[in-house]
Amino acid sequence: MKKLMTMTRQFRDDENGAAMVEYTVLLGIITVAVIASVIVVGTWVSGRWTGLTAALATVPALPAAPAPAPGP
């Protein structure tokens, strides 16, 4: 336990600790931005897919091809 407290004090007094916290906050901001972008793009693609599905549902089906004639 004493070793953990010593390491905590060293981390607190070290300036690299502050830089690490800054980078961690920056990484968190970037992560939130990426997740938000994925959600927005996913919603857009879903809307397009739904529109395409609805448009294809209104297209009449092609008639079936006639059966090939029996060979000689």
Image (cartoon, rainbow, N blue to C red):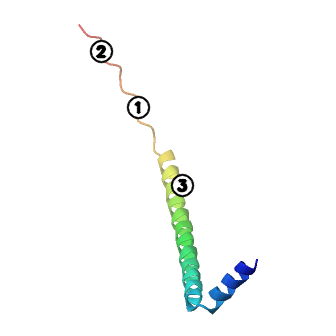
Q: Find numbered disc 1 in the image and state the secondary structure of the residue it sits on.
A: loop
Most extreme residue toward the left is 72
Give the labeled residue for mark 2: 69
**Kind of residue sitting beneath label 3:** Thr
Please tell me whether residue 15 is drawn above or below residue 69 in the rendered image. Answer: below
Depth check, front residue: 63 or 29: 29
Q: Quick one: label 3, few (<14), some, or many (20+) residues within 10 Å?
A: few
As measured in the structure, the alpha-carbon distance from the residue carrying label 2 to the one carrying label 3 is 41 Å
**Kind of residue sitting beneath label 1:** Pro
> Residue 2 at x, y = what percent?
75, 80
Give the labeled residue for mark 3: 50
Give the labeled residue for mark 1: 63
State whether residue 14 appears in this view: yes
- Relative placement, left or right, of 27 versus 4 is left
| Mark linked to residue 24 | none
Hey, which quadrant is residue 64 in on the image?
top left
Whichever of callouts 1 and 3 sits on the residue coming sooner in the sequence is 3
Whichever of callouts 1 and 2 sits on the residue coming sooner in the sequence is 1
Q: Find numbered disc 3 in the image and state the secondary structure of the residue it sits on.
A: helix
As measured in the structure, the alpha-carbon distance from the residue carrying label 1 to the one carrying label 3 is 25 Å
Hey, which quadrant is residue 26 in on the image?
bottom right
Whichever of callouts 2 and 3 sits on the residue coming sooner in the sequence is 3
> Residue 21 at x, y = what percent?
59, 85
As measured in the structure, the alpha-carbon distance from the residue carrying label 1 to the one carrying label 2 is 18 Å
Depth check, front residue: 9 or 66: 9
